[in-house]
Image (tube, grey):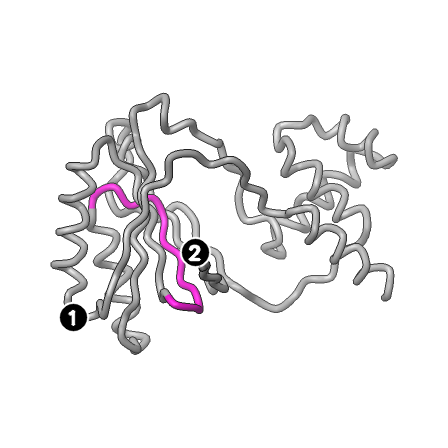
Amino acid sequence: DYETSLIIYTKEFVPEFLFPLGQKEGQMLLESQTTEPVNIDENDLKLLDLLQRDARTPVLSLAKKLNTTPYVVRYKIRSLLKSGVINSFKTLINLDLLGYGWYQVLLHTKNLTEKEEANLIEQLKTIKGIDYMVKCMGKWNFQVHVNLSSNLKFRETLLDLKSKLLDYIVSYDTLITFRKYKSKTLPEGAVNEIRQMILKK
């Protein structure tokens, strides 16, 4: 058996291990959500694919691979940022080397009003160890991703979450992720599908 979910939006918080660097608990790092489609061309698509493979690639190298000028590449990146197609450039952190595990709490909530949903998000900001949360459609209404250094700390966080969201939660489930093998924001299947849409225009 398996379950599928459609992501509506994500909200990313400052991870716990950055607190000693002066970051504040509950501070929001990133918000993204579904919006109206943005028109892109073939070179935009190629640029996105190159950036997701290595966002540190120099503009000159990108220009050579795209057979264009550095000026055009800079312009395209600025346009993709402005339109929201690119919403961040992230460092991938190996949590295992820092002694942190990756946990998930899957929440089935009652039907929430806009005010209740906003309050749920504010409550999540106060809970230790939450990396990011996802609102989705499917069996679960929300996925809460947690990075903590031990199962005991995860248990404490789970108890805190259940206490603060008691009025909203119908049921929940938990997962422990041992290894992440693959993660792409623009998978090959999506690249091919978008390319076909571009060709039809």
Asked if residue 181 lies left or right of residue 45, the reply is left
Look at the numbered disc 2 and give the secondary structure of its residue: strand
Q: Quadrant of the C terminus?
A: bottom right
Q: Which residue is mark 1?
A: 167
Figure label count: 2
- At label 2, counting other C-alpha atoms closer than 10 Å, the crowd grade (few under 14, some 14-19, many 20 or more) is some
What residue lies at 72% left-to-right and 30% top-to-bottom?
59
Would residue 131 be counted in the magenta stretch?
Answer: yes
Image coords of residue 197 (percent x, y): 79, 62
- Image-based side of 197 in relation to 140, left or right: right
* Residue range of the region highlighted in magenta in the rendering: 128-139
Residue 135 sits inside the magenta stretch:
yes
Task: Judge left or right: residue 16 versus residue 38.
Answer: left
Q: Residues within 10 Å of mark 1 (few under 14, many from 20)?
A: few
Q: Residue at horizontal 43%, vertical 34%?
A: 179
Question: Which is more toward the observer, 195 or 45?
Answer: 195
151 or 32, which is in the foreground? 151
Task: Say left or right for 182 vs 57.
Answer: left
- In the picture of the structure, the residue carrying the numbered disc 2 is 10
Q: Is residue 96 above or below residue 125?
A: above
Q: Quadrant of residue 67?
A: top right
* Residue 43 image point, x, y percent: 80, 46
Return the x and y of residue 101 as percentages of the image width and height.
Answer: 31, 34
Quarter of the N terminus within the rendering = bottom left
Q: Which residue corresponds to the image point at 30% horizontal and 38% vertical from the top-left?
A: 147
Q: Residue at x 67, y 27 (%)?
A: 57
